[in-house]
Image (cartoon, coloured by chain):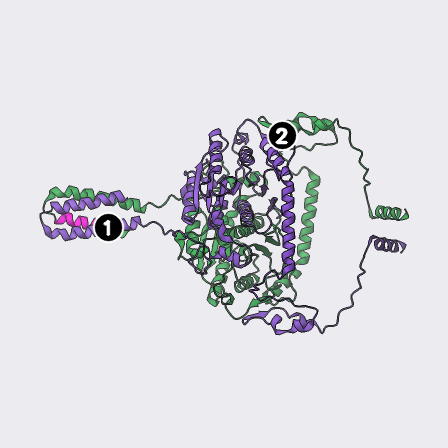
Chain colours: A green, B purple
Amino acid sequence: MEVELLELLKDLETLKRSLPDSSLHASIDKMRLRVDYVTNLANAAPARRSKVKDMSAEVVDTNPYSRLMALQRMGIVENYERIREFSVAIVGIGGVGSVAAEMLTRCGIGRLLLYDYDKVELANMNRLFFRPEQVGMTKTDAAVQTLSDINPDVVLESYTLNITTVQGFDTFMSSLKNKTFRPSKEGSGVDLVLSCVDNYEARMAVNQACNELNQIWMESGVSEDAVSGHIQLLVPGETACFACAPPLVVASGVDERTLKREGVCAASLPTTMGVVAGLLVQNTLKLLLQFGNVSPYLGYNSLKDYFPTMEMKPNPQCSNAACLERQKEYMLTKPVRDAAAKAKLEAAASVALEGPLHADNEWNISVVDDSDPDSIDGATSDALPEGLKRELPTADEFQNTPPAAVPTTTTVDDLEELRKQLEALNAE
Amino acid sequence: MEVELLELLKDLETLKRSLPDSSLHASIDKMRLRVDYVTNLANAAPARRSKVKDMSAEVVDTNPYSRLMALQRMGIVENYERIREFSVAIVGIGGVGSVAAEMLTRCGIGRLLLYDYDKVELANMNRLFFRPEQVGMTKTDAAVQTLSDINPDVVLESYTLNITTVQGFDTFMSSLKNKTFRPSKEGSGVDLVLSCVDNYEARMAVNQACNELNQIWMESGVSEDAVSGHIQLLVPGETACFACAPPLVVASGVDERTLKREGVCAASLPTTMGVVAGLLVQNTLKLLLQFGNVSPYLGYNSLKDYFPTMEMKPNPQCSNAACLERQKEYMLTKPVRDAAAKAKLEAAASVALEGPLHADNEWNISVVDDSDPDSIDGATSDALPEGLKRELPTADEFQNTPPAAVPTTTTVDDLEELRKQLEALNAE
């Protein structure tokens, strides 16, 4: 459009010069102003937010990070802004990967590496993220378009390739090794790899790369009937790798997709994929920002809202050579890890002896002995701030009720005591 | 822009007529063609998909419903297309409500009613759905813009109002009662109300409306520290209403938001809100399309990946008069419900006696007696289709291994046996 408008300006200029009658020049100048105006309108991109240098906790409507920095104030995360140092690679930008990418982008992750070879189709519209006007674009291009609009602070790298081809795998490996973003980082150039692919071959490729690079990664998957899914943490040498416990039946030597019956496709739902992406990125945040417990495995059975968990140790007979190497390294460093863990426990114990955990006590929390009725009745512990009322009576309104006769519970102190009780019971 | 371009065309026409020298007419005609071209480009709206009359299960890239209709083929849903008959009202288009609306839109829900009074801010960008270029728009307008682009088949109704004001509540009530979309529907005009609000007052307003209308609804919420949430099903008269078990401390007579400390805001995460929205809409689909079990209450503790469930009966001393009325009605209709449930059970039992559950047996499933080694070795039950191989040896390859000597486990039949064992152990 800009080219056409520029040509139009040139045409007007030419016409003006060739006109013998200068009385018409004014009308041509008016037309040139109109073209300028239209050019400006055409060039005006939709309002994008500008980059933010530092993450601020300031509570104003214009701060895109206020609700995230509040995680520090709430005592959940110690240093939220560290998120800008991290690089996360997402393999497979489909129903799970695209939503995971959007969540990390909105959280202000430092750098995202996106891998996919597929194009957006109307048949993908039953999952979140991609829009109908992106049909025909590669998923990586469409993702970069959407994500850079949402948060220009995130460094986005996109790789339109298939990691299961020889060349694709090489590029995948070298992109993971690249440390330009944070040269001081130990190990590979990324902090975490998220596998969001939909087939066995691609999972095995991610597994191979991560075992070779000694790279922590998380696997995710959704069932063909769309109603269950899972996420799994894989730490080379420490937990089972993807080849340690392979599925019972897999495709061999043929494209998995040709195995599917003609005219039959897997079902999918935006709900299941949204939940799996949410659980995946929540565990990513817990791992990177060090809060809560990272789940080694978490399933989601949506028909029953059942969430199974388990842990899997590596298989000493694993078919993957790199996995066996990582297992050996892990065993060799075990004494060092044990000593470090012991020292950390002892340090924590001595700190606990030295004084209160939170010396500043910003929230004025005080420990009250609840066996002492005076302190419960005290105004400091019981009064509510102005504007708040209790919906139920407070505890002391029940204090005049005589306590019901409850059987006395015997405290069991040791095994000897337990043995005596057992004998007494048997003697009856 | 179109106006300017139209004026430009008129200017060129005027100029052409006023030109004495017709040799310049050709160059003006060329300019007019350029303007036409630019006008066409400017008018080309971003590619939107056209409306779809019937949901098709055809497996082609251009079918936006193929992966949803596949739920029928997978045996999860009996009649997916029924989703087009349903109306769902979403109150609160924030971090949970907007994602719930997008999921239902992508699933092809018949009609969505959206309620919110707030505007989009940059501070909302840490959650999914809204985009920076929508800052300043009302959340309802921005949602309608995005959702109608994603799926033009969904009937969208948006209400920019606060349901806790007298006038807002009246409009809310009458919009729920409106049955124009499906006049034959029993009860109110909507099939489900989803509460995705962030304060007590608004929840009480939804509770009041649903108790008065005898309307099933689901409540959702996310904690102020952003790391937990819940969903809850509320069936007036049958389960606890929101007033049956109120929170212990609530705001009274003042705006809840003024209670928050100056410069402190609640934390929020796209992950927690995405998971809660996913669980909420998954349970919505299960309720409307009748598959799986709808959870009466489901919590999400993200620090531990723990998902508590519970059921709550209505409170006979509930402070809400409409709730008490619904409870009375529910008790009165109990004999009818019991009789219907009994008849259904008996009908199911008699069908089971009459013949096989699936007479057509499309997948050629046959029951094999696994105590008969011949049938296990038989080619029909064990051969894999071409292109598949087993990763582990089949069961019969282990048959020649002599069984290891394992201690015989004594089966304990009754309490008497258990007592004897205990005595024997104590005699040692």
Left/right placement of residue A329 relative to residue A200 reads: right
The residue that mark 1 highlights is: B36
Q: Residues within 10 Å of mark 2 (few under 14, many from 20)?
A: some
Residue A152 visible in image: no
Q: Chain of mark 1?
A: B
User: Please, what is the three-letter code of the amino acid marked with disc 2?
Assistant: Glu
Residue A19 visible in the current orientation: yes
Front residue of B418 and A90: B418
Residue at the image position 21 percent from the left and 48 percent from the top: A9
Mark 2, residue position: A391
Residue A28 placement (x, y as % from top left)? 17, 44
Please provide the residue range marked out in magenta: A4-18
The residue lying toward the viewer, choosing from A310 and A173, is A310
Q: Residue at x 69, y 72 (%)?
A: B373
Q: Is residue B306 magenta?
A: no
Q: CA distance from mark 2 to mark 1?
A: 69 Å
Relative to B123, say whether A129 is above or below: below
SS state under label 1: helix
